Amino acid sequence: MAIKKLLEEELQTLKDYQIKTNTIVGGLGKIELQLAALEDQKDIFLEDFKELQKEQSKTAQELQEKYGEGNIDLEKGEITTAE
């Protein structure tokens, strides 16, 4: 088996490729971790939104039982009912 020496320029080119590959792989890994963190945040916000919808629905039902069906003006704090 013969061993041949690479030219310094060839060896440097291969080392540069390895450095660039490591940089890309590291960057992709970082992005994957960020995506996982964002997915976790998304899940938390979706759960919060579901809980908010339940609370809104409960409050709407309570107000409807108290005042009847109607439209609420949040600026004036008034409800206009259909009588």
Image (tube, helix red, strand yellow):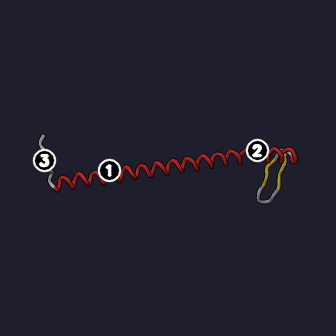
Farthest residue to the front: give it: 1
In the foreground, 69 or 37: 37
Query: Which residue position holds label 2?
Result: 57
The residue where tag 3 is placed is 4
Mark 1: amino acid = Thr
Amino acid at circle 3: Lys
- Badge count: 3
Q: Nearer the viewer, mark 3 or mark 1?
A: 3
Q: Residue at x 63, y 46 (%)?
A: 46
Q: Can you name the residue that lies furthest to the bottom here?
A: 76
| Residue indicated by mark 1 | 21
- Which residue is drawn at the image coordinates 79% and 48% (left, top)? 59
**Mark 3 vs mark 2, CA separation in Å:** 78 Å
Horizontal side, residue 28 vs residue 14: left or right: right
Residue 20, how many percent across, how many down?
31, 53
The percent position of residue 26, horizontal first and vertical second, equals 39, 52
Residue 29 vs residue 72: left or right? left
| Direction from residue 32 to residue 18 in the image, left or right | left
Which type of secondary structure does the marked residue at label 2 adopt?
helix
Counting residues from the N terminus, which is met first, the one under dot 1 or under dot 2?
Answer: 1
